Image (spheres, rainbow, N blue to C red):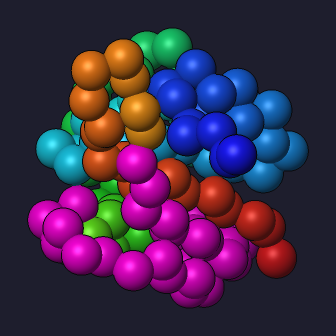
Amino acid sequence: MSRKPTGKMMAAIVCNLPDAAFGIDREGRILIFNQAAGRLFNIDPIEVEGRKIWDVLDIDDLTRTIAIMVKDQNAAPLEQIFPMKQNRVFQAKIIPCLLYTSDAADDLLCVDLGGR
């Protein structure tokens, strides 16, 4: 029997990824922002939790793609190359998933940025 992912489980996974990664809800609010993402974007991860992703990150191809996926209830996983500042390129994996709490399932987008 497989376990359903909970918020604590997802937070533990995202926090321990070596790549920059974060999770946002369907309103665009940041639920988790790991230390590698903090270093990549030069942001304190604790200060951004609860804020809208497009209020925290520059408006670019990545944030525009996230904004589209947030609104799409049937979004499929996406893997795409995004140019970033300082001539860096990242392969982003944006994965819609469900998190389970004791009384409901919450829709979430997980974003993993692997450097190239």
Please identify the quadrant where the C terminus is shown: bottom right
| Residue 42 visible to the viewer | no
Q: Residue at x 78, y 51 (%)?
A: 19
Residue 42 counted in the magenta span: no
Q: Is residue 31 left or right of residue 33?
A: left
Image-based side of 104 in relation to 87, left or right: left
Look at 27% across and 70% down and name the residue there.
69
Asked if 9 appears above or below 75 in the picture, the reply is above
Most foreground residue, 105 or 50: 105
How many marks on residues? 0
Quadrant of the image occupied by residue 51: top left
Residue 8 visible in the shown view: yes
- Using the image as rendered, state which of residue 5 and residue 85 is in the foreground: 5
Measured as percent of width and height from the top left, residue 4 is found at: 55, 40
Chief SS of the magenta region:
strand
Q: Is residue 23 above or below residue 58?
A: above
Q: State the extent of the magenta-drawn residues as a range.
A: 70-98
**What residue is at 41 percent from the left and 33 percent from the top?**
100
Q: Is residue 73 magenta?
A: yes
Locate residue 62, reporting x and y percent.
42, 70
Q: In this view of the protein, which residue sits in the foreground, 57 or 109?
A: 109
